[in-house]
Amino acid sequence: MLKNFMSEYQAKLRTPDEAVRAVKNGDWVDYTSSLGKPVLLDQALARRRDELSDVKIRGNLIDGPIMVAECDENQEHFTYHSWHCSSYERKLCDRGLCYYIPMVFHNNAAYYEFFLDVNVVMVSVTPMDRHGYFNFSVNTGVAAPITRMADIVIVEVNEHMPVIHGGYDECIHISEVDFIVEGPHEPFHYGKLIRPTEIDRKISQQIIPYLVDGATLQLGIGSMPNALGELIAESDLKDLGMHTELCSDAFLSLHNSGKLTNKRKSIDRGKGVFGCAIGSPELFDWLEDNHGVAAYPLEYVNRPSIIAQIDNMVSINSCVAVDLYGQVAAESSGSRQISGTGGQLDFLIGASASKGGKAFICMSSTYTDKKSVLHSRVRPQFNGDIITSPRSQVYFLATEYGVINLEGRSTWERAEGLISIAHPDFRDELIKEADARRIWRRSNRR
């Protein structure tokens, strides 16, 4: 006979206001990530604003509102931090209500184990199963290492979270939980579906020839990966695999087209591996109770040594700008934080070490500012910008004008290649800038 955990469940059950009494002045509180945001507990903690001081909260990729940040603009009571900004958290940064924590994602678990304090963790989970387990769902990538290190663990049962199978650390047992919170939740807000632009499609068309049958893909989120997913779905490619930090609707498109089988993966054969998921209701419906996918902590998904074991691993990431030396800025525009370091470096290193692997960083060749002025994303040289990927780790770069490989290339070869994929309107000026920096050979094409 199975043990009945309901008496323990009832003993640990609290209202949100009762549960947040565990938070003390000066505490570090963690909200984990994405749909792991504890909506009811966040609201309850905000209601304690005037009783508390210097409470620090961490999260990442969390949609708004975050009430502890919104209710205390002077930050006397609460200070919010993110280690990868969602569009909402980016706006908080713009208002001075969020502070970015630089983090390479494969080190996520180690950061918490060795360097960070977690006094209280508050995390949304699925309803408890008959064995006493709560599933971390699409938050599996980060949740377990944080809860393991927390002094007090509070789970918020969210009836809308999908149950997702995992490789390990996808669940927490009731015996490891201090308090349980229940309550009705609004259905998840998915935001506006990002539609690929014509430039996104052109960039994707540049990448398609580099893909082979049986390749395993890592795709970020946004219009370009969605465009690539659509093009692959229409291509002749077959037996593709998934090993990705973030699972998005692009992979659902690949699955629906019959391209995503995971049959030829070198490791985790037959399983599409991911850390977190953000997307449509249809995406979560596909992931729920699906034995063809497995959620893992980022310490596994993003570990370069794991990625390198996957033959024909192809990583697709994006950036804001690149300079003529091959340095990549992918997380900020000047000093303005846009997203985060995330897993770009992890997959650059891992995919490039894979047998047949390729690591791409993609961008449109230009952008238009608020004054309708056109600017090149290929810059002469960064000056004060935050560098996400150093020039020594950047390999394939793609724009709508082509693909280049910087691996092993000298400074003049890099400059020549980058100018060749810049927008034509800016190439002459970039040549002059390269020449002034003595990275343009006299015999180069002009």
Image (cartoon, helix red, strand yellow):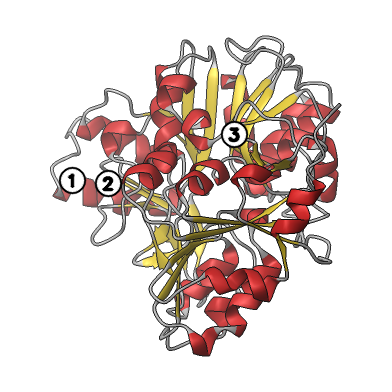
Distance from Cα at disc 2 to Cα at disc 3: 52 Å
What residue is disc 1 on? 435
Q: Nearer the viewer, residue 378 or 27?
A: 27
Question: Residue 388 placed where, x, y %?
Answer: 35, 47
Q: Earlier in the sequence, mark 3 or mark 1?
A: 3
Q: Nearer the viewer, residue 311 or 232?
A: 311
**Which label is found at residue 169?**
3
Query: Helix, strand or loop at disc 2?
Result: helix
**Which label is found at residue 431?**
2
Category of crowding for the residue at label 2, using alpha-carbon neighbours closer than 10 angstroms: few (below 14), some (14–19), many (at least 20): many
Tell whether label 3 touches label 2 (CB within 8 Å).
Answer: no
Which amino acid type is shown beneath numbered disc 3?
A: Asp
Question: Residue 368 placed where, x, y %?
Answer: 52, 66
Q: Dividing the picture into quarters, in which one does residue 138 lie?
A: top right
Question: Residue 329 placed where, x, y %?
Answer: 37, 51
Q: Nearer the viewer, residue 214 or 73?
A: 73
Category of crowding for the residue at label 1, using alpha-carbon neighbours closer than 10 angstroms: few (below 14), some (14–19), many (at least 20): some
Q: Nearer the viewer, residue 147 or 270?
A: 147
